[in-house]
Amino acid sequence: MPSYITLKTTKARWEAELMQQMLAAHDIPSRVIDIGVGIYFGQGSQAALQVRAQDQWTALLLLSPPEEDD
């Protein structure tokens, strides 16, 4: 069984699901885990995005904001 690590936490589950879809488009397996209880100010429950340990750095690069050229 692969070892999963938490890559990011969000205040709303939909954010984690969006990141999960972005990773799936690049064939990186991930899962969303609920970490909050109930509703968080009307936005849903808190969640964590987890990826396999070997995909950590690729996933971080894919989810990071683009660098701006000066």
Image (cartoon, rainbow, N blue to C red):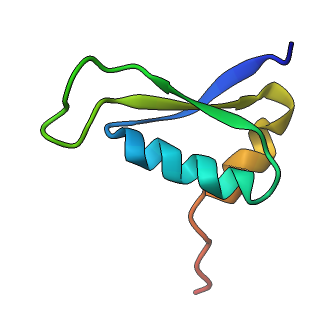
Seen from this angle, which residue lies furthest bottom?
A: 70
- Picture quarter containing residue 69? bottom right
Q: How many marks?
A: 0
Q: Quadrant of the C terminus?
A: bottom right
| Residue 65 higher or lower than 38, as above or below | below
Q: Position of residue 66 (x, y in %)?
A: 61, 71
Q: Quadrant of the N terminus?
A: top right
Seen from this angle, which residue lies furthest top?
A: 1
Q: Position of residue 54 (x, y in %)?
A: 86, 31
| Residue 11 higher or lower than 63, as above or below | above
Q: Is residue 40 left or right of residue 46?
A: left
Seen from this angle, which residue lies furthest left?
A: 41
| Residue 39 higher or lower than 28, as above or below | above
- The foreground one among 13 and 5 is 13
Q: Is residue 65 left or right of residue 56?
A: left
At x 42% / y 30%, what residue is drawn? Answer: 47
At x 40% / y 47%, what residue is drawn? Answer: 14
| Residue 38 higher or lower than 64, as above or below | above
Q: Is residue 8 left or right of residue 54?
A: left
At x 19% / y 32%, what residue is drawn? Answer: 40
Q: Position of residue 4 (x, y in %)?
A: 73, 21
- The foreground one among 39 and 48 is 39
- The foreground one among 26 and 61 is 26
Q: Position of residue 9 (x, y in %)?
A: 46, 33
At x 69% / y 36%, what residue is drawn? Answer: 30
- Picture quarter containing residue 62? bottom right
